[in-house]
Image (cartoon, coloured by chain):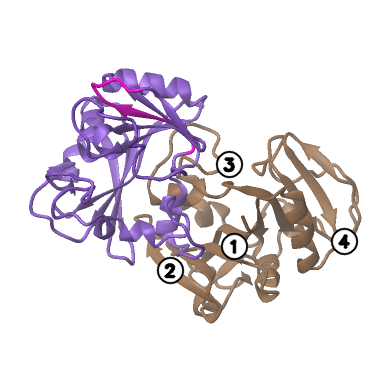
Chain colours: A brown, B purple
Amino acid sequence: MEQRVRVHCISVSREGIGAGRAQSFEQPFGHAVDPGQLFSWAGATASWPNRVDAGGTRGVEDRITRDFSHNIGAEIMGRNKFGPQRGPWQDHEWQGWWGDQPPFHTPVFVLTHHERPSFTLSDTTFHFVDLSPQDAVEKAKAAAEGRDVRIGGGVTTLREFIEADLVDEMHVAVVPIELGDGLRLWNSPEDLTDRYHLERITAPSGVEHHFFWRR
Amino acid sequence: MEQRVRVHCISVSREGIGAGRAQSFEQPFGHAVDPGQLFSWAGATASWPNRVDAGGTRGVEDRITRDFSHNIGAEIMGRNKFGPQRGPWQDHEWQGWWGDQPPFHTPVFVLTHHERPSFTLSDTTFHFVDLSPQDAVEKAKAAAEGRDVRIGGGVTTLREFIEADLVDEMHVAVVPIELGDGLRLWNSPEDLTDRYHLERITAPSGVEHHFFWRR
């Protein structure tokens, strides 16, 4: 089976904004963006990887979150998804937002211009790499042992991979809120329909789910 | 993780009919039912287990067909899904509809009152068992080695498992066609909402997907 590059559960506002300015420890998604608002549709499902208790819905949005890890062998993420630091790594105490049991369960490649040794938490190993999108995909595919590669975001990183034409399929949740300004995934999902099929459905939560796959 | 009993991709007409009368080799779903009509939504997707070529859609209905095999360790099916024969097995040449590579990839328990030895095709082993729904689920859970059990249908078999309160979650596709008469899954999906949450979405195909999970 051909290895695919997939995007899952990226959530943006109606204007296509996925994060605010001025990311910080207190505001992982930047100013004016409450991750609870952007991700409440996913957090409500039984299969959301960050869920800590039993329960949760098992409707259409659960089919979407179930697929997050299905046949994924590696993730690539931007440095700003990994943490709020900028510039050279001051210390190695920061190990991401996710505690001792990160929800990835595969190698994760963090894109950064600054060197840092790899480390492992539970069954997730974080590698820090200074690579172009093309080279990062090549490295992640090798690590994925035949399975697919997920581009984990944030939106700036994802835009680079879309612009380099490296994404085979993509799920984006458009949440019915407006954020005013911040980091944009797109001006309009229609921007991508020259290269991708686009299917949309609105879930009972009010979130409009966008599915893209290559033409 | 608790083992669950799941139902996936059962397709019925607007009246809840999943098969016609008088099943035969020529008409696996009985009179007046063209399986192409009931399953065209699924056959269009990239992940449909019976797909033989590359291609196919990767929208919301593909998320549904992707989940068909995900974490499933055994299937239970009625005899009439396995083949058109009735009564004692006349010979053992009939090995199901699916050729040398059945799309199950797990043990499959075929409910029948008539003895027949197990056999294996590729990575699917068919066992023939004369068991109540309860006992069949117990046996299938043991064979599934911690994974979930799928009730594969047909609709008569599925009704028995629903009536015995053995189904934890269920996906049913209601296709916008009318069949007049045949084997019914239900009079109305509302019949089940005393025991199940119900979420519905209509896909661009026109099919209304019903997701049930226990209250």
Residue B204 location (% of width, % of height): 33, 67
Crowd tier of the residue under label 3, counting other residues whose Cα lies within 10 Å: few below 14, some 14–19, many 20 or above: some
Residue that numbered label 4 is attached to: A87
Q: Earlier in the sequence, mark 2 or mark 1?
A: 1
Chain that bears disc 2? A
The numbered mark at residue A70 is none
Chain that bears disc 3? A
Residue B113 within the magenta-colored segment of the rendering: yes
Q: Is residue B122 above or below residue A134?
A: above
Chain that bears disc 1? A
Q: Residue at x 67, y 69 (%)?
A: A166
Q: Are marks 2 and 1 on the same chain?
A: yes
Q: Earlier in the sequence, mark 3 or mark 1?
A: 1
Residue that numbered label 1 is attached to: A32
The answer for how far apart the CA atoms under marks 4 and 2 are is 39 Å
Please name whichever residue, B99 or B42, is drawn nearer the observer in this view of the structure. Answer: B99
SS class of the residue under badge 1? Answer: loop
**Could you tell whether B39 is left or right of A80 in the image?**
left
The numbered mark at residue A50 is 3
SS class of the residue under badge 4? Answer: loop
Q: Are marks 2 and 3 in contact (CB under 8 Å)?
A: no
Q: Amino acid at mark 2?
A: Glu
Frontmost of labels 4 and 2 is 2
Q: Amino acid at mark 3?
A: Asn
Frontmost of labels 4 and 3 is 3
Residue that numbered label 2 is attached to: A199
The segment highlighted magenta reads B105-116
Frontmost of labels 2 and 1 is 2
